[in-house]
Each structure stands twice: as C-alpha cells, then as structure tokens.
Amino acid sequence: MSKPIVETKGLQVHFPLPTHFLSREKPVLHALNSVDVSIQPGESFCVVGESGCGKTTLGRAIIGLQTPTSGEVYFQDQRIDQMDEATRKPIRRDMQMVFQNPYASLNPRRNVFETLAEPIRHLMPEKSEAEVKAQVDAVLSATGCDLSWQRRLPHEFSGGQRQRIAIARALVTNPAFIVADEPISALDVSIQAQILNLLTDLQAERGLTYLFITHDLSVVEHFGTRVAVMYLGSVMELATAEDLFANPKHPYTRLLLEAIPKLEGGSFDKPRTPGELPDPVNPPPGCPFAPRCPMADAQCRSERPALRQLPQSVTQVACHHAE
Amino acid sequence: MAMLEVRDLHVAFPRGKRDWIEALRGVNLTLEKGERLGVVGESGAGKSMLAFAILNLIAEPGRISQGSISFEGTNLLELSDRQIRDIRGNRISMIFQDPMVTLNPVLTIGVQMIETLQAHRKISKREAHKLCVDKLKMVAIPSAETRMDAYPHELSGGLRQRVVIAIALLTDPELIIADEPTTALDVTIQAEIMALILKLCRENDVALILITHDLGVVAEVTERLMIMYAGKCVETGKTREIIDGPSHPYTGGLLKALPQNAGRGRKLYQIPGSMPPITNLPSGCAYHPRCEFATDRCKGGAPELVNGVACYTPLKQAEVQS
Amino acid sequence: MITWRSLFKKFLSDPVALCSGIVLLILVFMAALAPFIAPQNPYDLMQIDIMDSELPPSWHDEGEARFPLGTDEQGRGILSTIMYGTGISLLIGIGAVIVQAILGVTLGLIAGYKGGWIDAFLMRLADIQMSLSTLMIAIIVLAIFSATFDANVYADYAIFMLILIIGIAEWPKYARTVRSSVLGEKNKEYVDAARVIGLPARKVMWKHILPNTLTPVLVISTIQVAEAIMTEAALSFLGLGMPVDKPSLGSLIRSGYELIFSGSWWITFYPAMVLIALILALNLLGDWMRDVLNPKLRRGED
C-alpha cells in the first residue's frame, strides 16, 4: 500500500460525564477505544455503525473538533493533534468537513457568499477580494449551485440545495481530504442520489479522499472503497467494500447486513430478539458485542479480542472466532 | 365492504385571510381487514397528514375541507368528539416516530398502560395489570413484570418503541397507523421492531397503515403500496408488483435512485430537482418539471388515478408501445 | 427565519402593537423635540416666575392659556416639564439598558461558550447579583453618593449615576438569556464548521454565535427599558433620583405628591399618566415581540 494520507494510532476519546462536584466517582464515557485506521489517498474510506458506536467522534477527532484523550493523528506523515494553530493553518486548507444536517450547518444569518468566502479569507489571507470572488464562483459551479444564490440566506433553499452549498464550502479551499459525517441521511430519497453522485463526481475530478461516516450499509456498498465497522468505540471489522458484503467475517457485520430492509422482502419474517448496546460507561470486560452475539462463549466474555489480520486476506477482524 | 374507506380527501390550511392551501388534494384509499398498506413519500408529500386526517386529528387552523372517511360503515368526519375518542386509541391505534409523543415522562409505564386500558374497558386494576404484562411480553420486552414500574427515560429507544407498540395493542385494535415508527432507530433495532410489527399484525389479524420514506421497509412489511407526491397519490397497487415493475415515472425514479439498485462504482440514477412545496405547485401534473417523459399534456392537466397510476405516460404502457 | 420586512408587516397588522408603537413614537418625538415645541424651558430660571405657581390647567377658571396643563409649585408649566422629563426618563431607561446589554451579552456569551469553571463563576455571580434587589443597591449607592458630594455635583452627575447603577444591577438578566441561547447554538454544526477552518474562539463567538442569539435580547430589551424607567421613577419618588431642577417623570410625580391634598392634583396626575402610557406601550410592544419572535409559537410558518 502507498503512504496513507490520514492515519490514527491508538486513538482514544473519553468524555467525562457530568457529576455533582462533591461526588467521588468520575464516570467516563469511552467514545473511542484505541482506534487505528489508515486512509489511502483517493479512496472513500467508510465508517459504519449504529448510534453511539463512536463513528462521529472518530471523524471529529481526525478533523480536530475533538481533542483525543490519547493517541495520535497524522496527516501526510505530520502529527496534527498537538500542533499549534499557526503551523496547523496550512493543513486546515487540506482537511474539510461536510456535516449531517444541512439545516444546522449553515449560519442562518449569513448569505451564501459570506459563508463560502470565510474559509478562503481565513486560511488563504494572501488572496485578494477578486480572487476570493472568483474562487467562490468556481466552487459554486463545480457543485451544481447557481451563481445567483450568493446574496441569498440559507432559509431560502431546500435541504438538497443547502447540502450542495455546504459541500461547496468544504471544497472552497481545494482540500485533499474530506470528512463527510452522514451527509445524506437528513435528505429525502430522491435528493440523496443527487448528493451521492455529486460526491462521486467531485472525487473523480479533484482526486479527493473521503472519510465517509454513515449508518447506511447500502450506501457503503455503492460508494465505499474500504469499510471500518465500529461497535462501542472499537473497530470490529476492516475490509474492502467487496469483501465486506460478499464475505462478512464479524458476527456484528452479519447482523448489520441482515438488518437492511431488502426490496425482495422476506427478511423480516422471523422475529428477532431485542439487542441493545451495552452501557458505554461500564463496558463489559470481554468483547463488547458478546451480549448480543450468537457465537459468544466464555473466552469472549472475559477477554477482549484485538483487531487481527485474517490469513490470506486483507480483512482485519476483532473476533476470537472469525476465520 | 372494506374496513376503511377514504374518499376524495382534501385537507386545507389557510394562507392569509381568504386563501387556502391544500396539503392533501383528493386522496382515495381502501383497506380490508388485516391488510397491510404502505404509504411512501418524501417529506412534505402529505403522508403524515393523511394519517392525522384519518383520525380526525388535523390541528387548527387546518381542516378537512372535503371528502369522507368511513370506518366499518361509519363516517368518522360526522362523529362527535366523544364518539371519535371511542374509536381513536381503541379500535384504531397509532404509533408515532418519537415514542415520547405517546409516553408521559413523569408516569411509569405501568400506570400509563393501565390508564389507557381503563379509559376504554371496564376492567379491574388487577386484571388490567395482568393484561398489560401480557402485552409487554408479547412485544418481547425482557423482564416485563419489573418494566411496569420503570419510567420511560429508563428504557432505551428500542425498548420505548416496543412499549408504544404494546400500548397500541392494548385494546386489541382493528387498525394500527404507524407513522415512521423506526426512523429514529438504528438499523438493527429497526429490523427488530418491524419484524415484531409484522408478526403481531399477522397473528392478530390487525390491519396496518405504515407511513415511511423507506421503500425497503415497505417491501418487507406491506402487501399494498401507495406512493404519494405533493399531496396526491400517484401510484397504488400490490407492493410486490410496484417494486418489481413501477408504472409512475416518480416511483420508477425512486427505485432506480436507490444505491442497492446501482452497480458498485456506477453513478446512481437521479431525479432532477426537488418536490415543489405545496404553496407553489406547478400546473398540471405536479411531477412534470422533474419527469423525463413529460409531454405538453402533462403541463396542461393533472392526470387522474386510473388503474392504480396517475400518469399520462406510465412506464409500463410506454414499454408496451415501444 | 424572520426578516425585518416580515416583522414590520406583522407589526402593521397587529392593532395592539401598532397602537403601542404609535404612542411610543409620539412620546419619543415629544421628548426629542421638547426644546423646540415646549411652551417654556423649565431649566431656564429666567422663564420661571414664582407668581405662576400652582396654576390649574387652562380650562379651569383660574387657569392661564400659557400653561395648558397648569403649573407646579415653582411656577413651571406642567406640559413643558413633562416634555423635558419624558426625555430624561427615556434617556436613563435606554442608557441603562445599553449598559446592561453590553455587560450581560459579553459575560453571557463568554459563560455559555467557554463553559466549565468560567461559566460556573459568572453564573454564581449573577445569582448573587439577582438576590440583591436593584432598588436596594441603588438606594444604598445613591444615598452614599448624595451624602458625599454637595447638591450641585449630585445634580450634574445624577443621570450618569442612575444609568450606571441600574445598568450594572440588571446585567444578569441579559447574561442568562444570552447564555441559554448560546448553549443552544454552540452545538450546532455551523459553529463546528467555523471551528474546522481554525477560526479563533473570539471570532466564532462574536461573528457566528452572537448574531444568532440576538432575537431574545431584542425582546427583553424592550421590557428592560420599561423596567429601568420604572426603577428610576421609584428612586426619584424616594428622593434619590433626578434632582428637582432637572426633573424626570418620577421626580415630577414626587414634587406634586405632597400637594394632592391641597387640591393641586394636576401636578402629579399628568406626569403619572404619561409614565403609565410609556410603560404600558413598552411592555405591550415587548410582549408582542416575544410572541412573534418565539419559534415555539410560530410553528409551520417558515
């Protein structure tokens, strides 16, 4: 494999939970438990999992919105998680983010031009106003936005149009790497396809690398190059998209795949037992998935499986029983 | 006679002093006993409005301006508030997207369930308690006895939605209207809840109206399907037949746009534009500005629902001709 | 999202808001143009004649046409003193609110955005401040002030003192309002988007969050102006506010209060009516604004 564009080593994020200031206990939520991922240039690296699995926290830690409790984040071999703001500024041009909710990700009191010009003005102070204007025009046409939108406020646009504007804002500094946190899940079905196609086209034109965070496996199958399946702050399975769907190794991956409603029907015919996430504040000692896992045995309940490479494959799995 | 029959239903909201905007523009629907119907549409298509209208729950200042809703032969729109309450929550139950709409956060599950039951049945507290525990077991809630004393916030999202389903089933309704019951839940929990609803409907012969935006869920759970667009039904028929061979270009577009229907790495089919707001509908067929088969006729007049499809150039017919 | 234009349209279509707006506008114009339209200048000792004192309104037999609403015990025309006094009352009210807003918005913004111990410290400070009544603080400070300096100095600086005291005493209301809307806004994704490009906290706070928290500030400002005018009137009534030679509405009411029983009711009555009209108009306008701008009461309109 070539040199990764983004890499995390032993990334951990713990959230201290609010307590009474006199209480002795200091409960901590383990949002990320030692996550190692390396993202190759030009790929669409997908992170899937259910709510509370830490996928959003991973994206936020990589982009710098969340300070890691421990571990390291690298961008093109430079460690960025502890970098001071002045050194980091040029790197920020290369890393951008698209958010889930287009109704909240645009400042309601700023017009489109102001929203798009801000990243250039802040990160590329050498640009003149005319260059800023030209760059905003260029990125708007690249994302399928009308140039006449610039003086209008976000509330005048539909969800799909707002998401295009949000994507334009992420692209305005010509980044190499984009974190897309559930960029289509707040949109209507017919709009989702438009935005997914836009992301695919932009990747082809500009050689972008995506970290694509989603709960929707059918999108991953269509869009992803490699996939990390997360559960309770840990990566459970890391595989290419083809392998993951053709030959899922981890029992949790299989559970996720079975849960997708199929157009052919018939997969909801047998009742399922309720399964819930274990309490992330006091995670069970062994495998986090063991309480829901049909294959779990005594070893699973006591010993946490590490992510390991399967023989004769590129797939990595954190399971004692996968082979 | 069908169990539920909705004829030419219009719901209107006032705009300004004299102007009215129609959120539903003439919807017809029939539902037989024990039948499961899926209502699919994008946000703003009027699918939730339809559910609220059936229960006569349209909030002021909106109102049902035209049409009839007959349930087992009685027109729900002519009933008094008292009479409709006797049907709502008793013979017709509702499950909402957010369980906290149904659940009161300051009362225990048990108190709420028993209260609901006693509102509709003459029944002693002990019998009611027993029945409630039975229903909780029916929806596969672990340790149902102790959950009766739990408050809603002590349960996870999935369990809360199960409790809501148990409450919906308390009075042995003939019809359940579920409005996006699993949208807020994770995929694995969604699969559990939908499998549960499917099983309960089958076993107890309960009819279901499932309102959702997810064609996959509808394909799994329902027998008949209704596709809504801009306050109108554009296509209706057997779920299987529509999914395998849609007639309306909009339905076809929605299906083709699903990532599971595109090959890996291939571009998705995309419907251009977005649904017009009900305040600003185009002339003729509301879908024509986005439709690749639109003709001048589509711009002029709105097509009626004929043979389950409201389109002048339905896909199947087009294929037959070519 | 509400634009200024739609707000103005709603304002025109609401009779209560429109009436209060008109009343307010008349009072503000009257106060602002007082030097040009008032029959006398009550500050100018040359125009005051003690022989004119306690004349009843002009429609009484003993009244004079020069003084439409009569005169007070020093011979100043009531109409003129009301015109000048309304100006002073409004000046104190608006000035105090500006002080409150600057203090409260800044501290509330910092408390809400920074969180942690800064938030805890500022909010406990606000709690302590709120537990002391504004009037009590004002009485103590003004009593010390007027005892320390002689009457002339007091007369010169009274207006600034009132503005400062009422302003400082009421900042927690703004701080709390701003803090709670900052807490709602700061987790929105547009704030994250600003942080992703590395914008410093100061810019995120002032340029992104602040403009989105100003709606509730606008609402409480109207009510707070009314409150500040009331506080000033109460202080003046207690003899701790504006001096007699530069009367506000409150000191006018006070100056006539002792004469009510001797039959000179007009000295107190007319300033009191103007004060009531002013406060009522401000409060009604504030209520209307709260209803219009409250997103919870505005479902399904955007």
Image (cartoon, coloured by chain):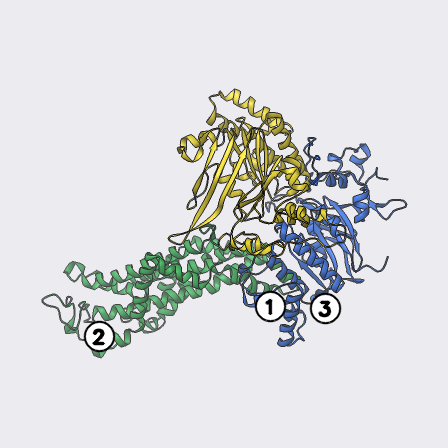
Chain colours: A blue, B yellow, C green
Badge 2 local density, few (<14 within 10 Å), some, or many (20+)?
Answer: some
Query: Quick check: can you spot residue B208?
Result: yes
Image quadrant where residue B247 sits: top right
Instruction: Name the image quarter holding residue C149.
Output: bottom left
Q: CA distance from mark 1 to mark 2?
A: 60 Å
Instruction: Give the Cα distance between marks 3 and 2.
Output: 69 Å
Q: The disc numbered 3 marks a residue on which chain?
A: A
Real-space CA distance between mark 1 and mark 3, rounded to the nearest whole angstrom? 28 Å
**Mark 3 and mark 2 on one chain:** no
Q: Residues within 10 Å of mark 3 (few under 14, many from 20)?
A: few
Q: Which mark is residue A90?
A: 3
Is C1 on the left-hand or right-hand side of B253? left
Dot 3: element: helix
In the current view of this chain or complex, which residue is farthest to the front? B321
On screen, residue B81 versus residue A291, left or right, reads left
Which comes sooner in the sequence, label 1 or label 3? 3
Q: Which residue is drawn at the image coordinates 66% and 55% (left, top)?
A: A194
Percent position of residue B238, x then y: 62, 37
Q: Which mark is residue A147?
A: 1
| Direction right: furthest residue | A312
Q: Are marks 1 and 3 on the same chain?
A: yes
The x and y percentages for residue C218 are: 44, 61
Q: Amino acid at mark 1?
A: Leu
Mark 2 lies on residue: C39
Chain ID at mark 1: A
